[in-house]
Amino acid sequence: MRLRTGLLLTALISPAGLLLAADPAAAVTVSTEAELQAAFADTNETQIDLANDIDLTCAGGGDLDRNAGDPLSVNGHGFTIRQTCPGERVIHNVGGGALTLQQVAITGGSVADDGGGVYSDGDLTLVEATVVGNVASGAGSSGGGVYGIGDVVELVRSTVAGNIAAEVGGGVFASAQINLVNSTVTGNQATEGGGLSSQQVGGPGVVLVYSTVVANQALAGANIAGQGVESFGSVIALGTGGGQDCFVPLEVSNGYNFVGDGSCGFAESTDIPSGGDPLVGLLGPNGGPTPTMLPLPDSPLIDAIPTPNCQDDGAALVTIDQRGVVRPQINGCDIGSVEVAPVGPEPVLLEPTFTG
């Protein structure tokens, strides 16, 4: 399994969540648009903490712009950054510096270019983040929610939903690899790759571990398009718009995947390669920091992975689901980003610990 950066592994090693590497003493806390604009543009800043929801306005400068080679972490603490200026994306990160967005919602971006929500030419990591309702509307524009042209785009316990791109990658477009762990991608639209599209050459560009990629829309690759997909314990189904679930030349299954229409080419004995409807609920608040899609009581995803195999290839460090519920529950682990807990006492949620 090609999980390429240490940051992703750090997020998985601790069930309590990602500990940001930045020195908390060096973090700046912002409460207003002006403070956020200044901190994001400041190349000396390494960590920004939000203390409120913040709306970006035309008068305030539109999108958040940064041109730096050094990394930056934005810790939203559950707050939202909302773009309200027409024709502006939310975040524009150039200069090659890595960007981490944690426990923050990114919404409202609308640009006639690539990257309606987030544009980054450095490595991009989303941890317990939500990217929803962004648009890349120009002719040939890609990455309605996220446009990444660094070495990797990583989603950990995050949700990308309801974004639109005119061309490729309604949810996420990347020139290199897209890694998802315990994450949900749904309701996004594009011409190709409604949910996810990676143009990485020489190997699977999309790598899934315990993730849910369903009900995205495109003419080709309704859920996933690009150079290839590698997956363990994930569901890819219910694509709409005329495209099959997958439109990729290379497929690698590490087992226990559910595909709706058989187009992803997974052929391990533990896969459900053409299962139709996975029977998941609508995206909503099911506990935890991000919206998720809870398997219904009769879903074939529930307990489909035997307990001894819950941490097979690619999942060795995954002990919780997207919400923080411990895996396994009941008689095994569930396929996808959500682990259904038995009826009774509330499941234990392992909340993240932050340094800022």
Image: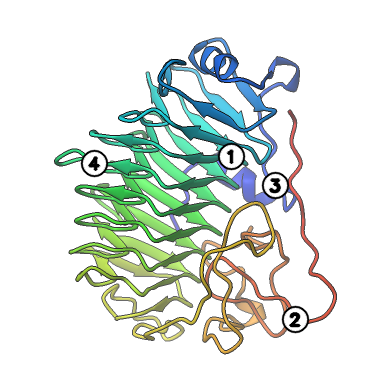
Q: Secondary structure at mark 2?
A: loop
Q: Which mark is residue 342?
A: 2
* 321 lies above or below 174: below
Q: Decide which of 224, 251 is in the foreground and name it.
A: 224
Q: Residue at x 60, y 53 (%)?
A: 290
Q: Which residue is mark 3?
A: 17
Q: Give the CA separation, mark 3 to mark 4.
A: 35 Å
Real-space Cα separation, disc 1 to disc 4, in angstroms: 24 Å
Instruction: Report the side of 85 relative to 341 (left or right).
Output: left
Q: Are marks 3 and 4 in contact (CB under 8 Å)?
A: no
Which quadrant holds residue 46? top right
Question: CB under 8 Å between callouts 2 and 1?
Answer: no
> Which residue does the numbered mark 1 point to in the structure image?
104
Badge 1 element = loop
Residue at x-position 30% and y-position 81%: 261
Q: CA distance from mark 2 to mark 1?
A: 29 Å
Residue 146 coordinates in the image, percent (x, y) = 38, 42
Assess whether mark 4 and mark 1 are in contact (beta carbons under 8 angstroms): no
Give how far across and how far down residue 229 sits, in percent. Answer: 33, 62
Q: Are marks 4 and 2 in contact (CB under 8 Å)?
A: no
The residue positioned 60% from the left and 68% from the top of the image is 338
Image quarter (top left, top right, bottom left or bottom right) of the N terminus: bottom left
* Viewer-nearest of discs 3 and 1: 1
Compared across the picture, whether 289 is left or right of 5 comes to right
Q: Nearer the viewer, mark 3 or mark 2?
A: 2
Q: Nearer the viewer, residue 75 or 227?
A: 75
Q: Identify which amino acid the numbered label 4 is placed on.
A: Ser
* Mark closer to the observer (3, 4): 4
Which residue lies at the image location 25% right of the left edge and 51% below the top edge?
A: 202
Q: Amino acid at mark 1?
A: Val
For disc 4, the marked residue is 137
Q: CA distance from mark 3 to mark 1?
A: 14 Å
